[in-house]
């Protein structure tokens, strides 16, 4: 009895916080998405699916996100995998911890400043000037899809490296040795032993990067210059400029629904892969 | 292979290094290096808008990290070894808090709080008719509350990993020696989880200090440092932003590396090997 009381007291503040600052706001979004827009913006209570029917009005943002998020995820995977493999199998334990910290740390630093660095690098006086100086003619890099994809890969690489690293680190070296002893060339050992065993890590990394990309705002805002915009940019516009809260709420609910669908697909995939869901330390 | 790793680390750190380099540029133009100077740091630190935004960011980060550490630790202790419905709900909420994108959290918090304040403020006005009634609005308080939510989930996740790795025998031994539960907590549990709490505090502070998107929605008329930087960038790239960015990155790096070292050392001390 006393124990139960202690538990309740310990849980009460956090519970209240999550109820007021998370559950309640999410319920509000759901309710607002069924409402109507007020004459001066904001929200008028109603029960209609009109906002959802109107989603194609922001179709371009959905299209951009649904194309660039998977492409960005794939690029991050292609760059991250060899690095994760090298860290897990080719580096001594002493260096490994240090290098791992070096991979994680940028992820926790300001994505705003890190994207700004790319404005600086890809802007007129940066890489394009260098390319022109080398005699390849004038190119424009900033405010293009290329710039946005660069920012995406740069920002989310650590999140991709980590889960793959964890799955490869657990890999029993003796399996690779056995494969080599049986006469398999290195590439074949990799394709038939290491790669299949690392698939759970690959799936986790892709899922994490993809769902975070779905909600991205800063990178397209800074490197896409209004030409390459995501759902997140549409949301900022709807809430802070057009003040169309009901429609914005419907866009937000749709975004969360796509993310939930992704997570469900991931969980089903993991069950099939049979991999343990392994705790990935992002911190 | 090693060369490839080197190239990727270069990709991760070179842009940061270039920002830092150009923050010491003596020239007025952001991208032509015209000699070494620290004048932009002086300019940034003498700019009252920067200092005000910095103060807002630091105070919000400190308050939200403190709230998150205290309440998050309490919740993690309560959830330790718990099963059943309460645990399932708690786990679901923690994952939702971490996984739902910041932009949705920001929007949801904005519309919920604006609506709630719209209901509460007239009531407050009626309670104190002299016009002295406090009016609730978006600002410092809502920033702290919104940041504390994510940070609390973070602290609970960090401490849960630590509490699971903790040797239960120590607590049982303490109880066998007739220590009351509170004394056991103070003398056995707390010292073991303290590195986790400290690391959680540092990570929470960094998260809040660096967050742009949630603050963008819930800050009201307040300006945090990331909001200030974002709106300055829209007006153009200047060496002053490079200086501010370098300081922000430098501060985050110090806090983050401290948190990593504390966590890793703590993990080894708790007998749970691994990186």
Image (spheres, rainbow, N blue to C red):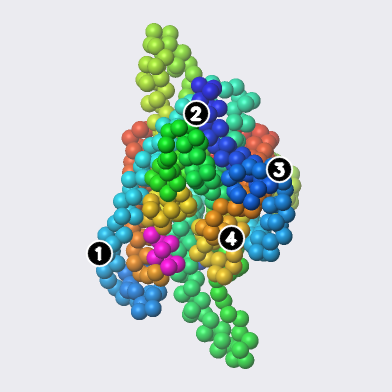
Q: Chain of mark 4?
A: B
Q: Which circle, 2 or 4, is nearer the viewer?
A: 4
Q: What label does residue B228 carry, if any?
A: 4
The residue range painted magenta reads A234-241
Q: Would you say residue A264 is visible in this rendering?
A: no
The CA span between labels 4 and 1 is: 37 Å
The CA span between labels 1 and 2 is: 45 Å
- Residue at 34%, 55% in the rendered image: A61
Residue A136, horizontal then vertical, whole percent: 43, 33
Q: What label does residue B36 carry, if any?
A: 3
Q: Looking at the picture, tell me which residue is in the foreground, B128 or A12.
A: B128
Q: Chain of mark 1?
A: A
Q: Where does label 1 land, which residue?
A: A53
**Looking at the image, residue A233 lies above or below residue A114:** below
- Residue at 52%, 62% in the rendered image: B216
Judged from the image, the secondary structure of the residue bearing numbered disc 3 is loop
Q: Are marks 1 and 2 on the same chain?
A: yes
Res A191 quadrant in image: top left
Residue A52, horizontal then vertical, whole percent: 28, 64
Mark 3 Cα-neighbour bin, 10 Å: few <14, some 14–19, many ≥20 = few
The CA span between labels 3 and 1 is: 58 Å
Q: Chain of mark 3?
A: B
């Amino acid at each position: 009895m006393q124990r139960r009381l202690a538990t309740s007291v310990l849980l009460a503040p956090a519970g209240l916080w999550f109820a007021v600052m998370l559950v309640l706001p999410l319920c509000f979004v759901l309710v607002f998405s069924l409402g109507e827009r007020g004459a001066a913006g904001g929200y008028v209570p109603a029960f209609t699916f009109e906002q959802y029917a109107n989603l194609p009005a922001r179709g371009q943002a959905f299209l951009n996100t649904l194309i660039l998020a998977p492409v960005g995820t794939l690029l991050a995977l292609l760059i991250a995998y060899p690095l994760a493999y090298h860290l897990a199998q080719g580096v001594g334990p002493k260096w490994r911890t240090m290098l791992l910290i070096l991979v994680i740390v940028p992820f926790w630093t300001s994505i705003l400043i890190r994207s700004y660095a790319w404005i600086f690098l890809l802007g007129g006086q940066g890489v394009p000037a260098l390319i022109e100086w080398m005699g390849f003619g004038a190119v424009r890099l900033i405010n293009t899809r290329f710039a946005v994809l660069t920012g995406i890969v740069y920002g989310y690489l650590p999140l991709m490296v980590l889960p793959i690293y964890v799955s490869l680190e657990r890999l029993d070296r003796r399996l690779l040795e056995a494969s080599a002893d049986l006469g398999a060339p290195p590439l074949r050992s990799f394709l038939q032993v290491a790669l299949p065993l690392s698939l759970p890590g690959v799936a986790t990394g892709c899922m994490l990067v993809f769902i975070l990309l779905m909600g991205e705002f800063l990178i397209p805002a800074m490197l896409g210059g209004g030409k390459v915009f995501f759902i997140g940019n549409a949301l900022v516009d709807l809430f802070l400029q057009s003040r169309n809260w009901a429609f914005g709420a419907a866009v937000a609910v749709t975004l969360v629904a796509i993310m939930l669908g992704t997570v469900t697909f991931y969980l089903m995939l993991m069950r099939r892969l049979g991999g343990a869901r392994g705790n990935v330390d992002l911190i | 292979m090693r060369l490839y790793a080197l190239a990727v680390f270069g990709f991760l750190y070179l842009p940061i290094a270039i920002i830092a380099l150009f923050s010491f540029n003596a020239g007025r133009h952001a991208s032509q290096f015209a000699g070494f100077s620290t004048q932009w740091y002086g300019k940034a630190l003498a700019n009252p808008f920067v200092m005000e935004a910095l103060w807002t960011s630091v105070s919000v980060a400190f308050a939200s990290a403190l709230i998150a550490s205290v309440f998050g630790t309490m919740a993690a202790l309560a959830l330790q070894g718990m099963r059943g419905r309460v645990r399932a709900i708690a786990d679901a909420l923690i994952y939702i808090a971490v996984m739902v994108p910041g932009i949705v959290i920001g929007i949801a918090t904005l519309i919920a709080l604006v609506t709630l304040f719209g209901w509460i403020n007239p009531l407050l006005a009626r309670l104190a008719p002299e016009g002295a009634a406090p009016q609730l609005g978006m600002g410092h308080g809502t920033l702290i509350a919104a940041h504390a939510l994510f940070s609390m989930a973070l602290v609970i996740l960090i401490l849960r990993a630590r509490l699971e790795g903790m040797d239960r025998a120590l607590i049982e031994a303490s109880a066998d020696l007739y220590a009351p539960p509170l004394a056991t907590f103070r003398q056995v549990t707390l010292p073991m989880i303290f590195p986790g709490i400290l690391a959680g505090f540092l990570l929470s502070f960094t998260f809040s200090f660096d967050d742009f998107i949630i603050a963008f929605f819930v800050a009201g008329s307040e300006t945090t440092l990331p909001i200030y930087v974002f709106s300055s960038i829209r007006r153009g790239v200047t060496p002053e932003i490079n200086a501010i960015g370098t300081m922000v990155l430098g501060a985050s790096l110090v806090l983050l590396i401290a948190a990593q070292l504390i966590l890793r050392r703590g993990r080894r001390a708790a007998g749970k090997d691994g990186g």
